[in-house]
Image (spheres, helix red, strand yellow):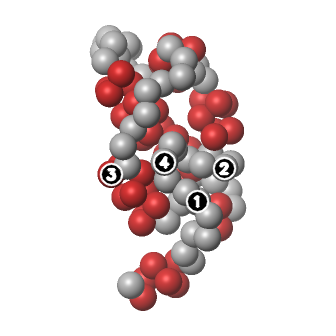
Amino acid sequence: MLHQILDPRLPIPRENSIARSIILVVSLALACLNSNPKLRPTMKQVSEAFLAPKLALAKPFYSISLAQLQGNNRGLWWEGVSTENPSSPQEEQGS
């Protein structure tokens, strides 16, 4: 479970905004670890994810597993940011 990888000295987040931020960071980290480099998010996508508005959690923070977050990385890494037509690394460097 997600809460099990957090620093045990810190309390489980009670505020929805903090929980959503933790989920976003972990989701992005998992996406960046994809063994296929073409499936990893670009820096532009990562930046857009941090700037995108965050939606309310659909389930309690303590019930979210890493497998669920990793499964979300196959389509959208986060709510509100599309992964369709990601630019290639060469396009990123040229802009």
Query: Contact, CB < 8 Å: mark 3 with mark 4?
Result: no
Q: Amino acid at mark 1?
A: Thr
State the residue position of label 4.
80
Q: Amino acid at mark 2?
A: Gly
Earlier residue among tags 2 and 1: 2
Q: Is residue 83 above or below residue 24?
A: below
Q: Quadrant of the C terminus?
A: bottom left
Q: Is residue 22 above or below residue 58?
A: below
Earlier residue among tags 3 and 4: 3
Within 10 angstroms of label 4, few (less than 14), some, or many (20 or more) residues? Answer: few
Badge 3 element: helix
Q: Quadrant of residue 13?
A: top left
Task: Kindly report the distance in space between the C-alpha atoms of the residues bearing marks 3 and 4.
Answer: 10 Å
Q: Residue at x 61, y 70 (%)?
A: 85
Residue 75: which numbered mark, if any? 2
Task: Kindly report the distance in space between the C-alpha atoms of the residues bearing marks 4 and 2.
Answer: 12 Å
State the residue position of label 1.
83
Q: Residue at x 58, y 59 (%)?
A: 83
Q: Residue at x 31, y 18 (%)?
A: 15
Earlier residue among tags 4 and 2: 2
Name the front one of labels 3 and 4.
4
Q: Residue at x 65, y 67 (%)?
A: 38
Query: Contact, CB < 8 Å: mark 2 with mark 1?
Result: yes
Q: Quadrant of the N terminus?
A: top right
Task: Kindly report the distance in space between the C-alpha atoms of the residues bearing marks 1 and 4.
Answer: 10 Å
Earlier residue among tags 3 and 1: 3
Q: Amino acid at mark 3?
A: Leu
Res 37 seen here: no
Residue 44 left/right relative to 76: left
Q: How many marks?
A: 4
Q: Amino acid at mark 4?
A: Gly
State the residue position of label 3.
51
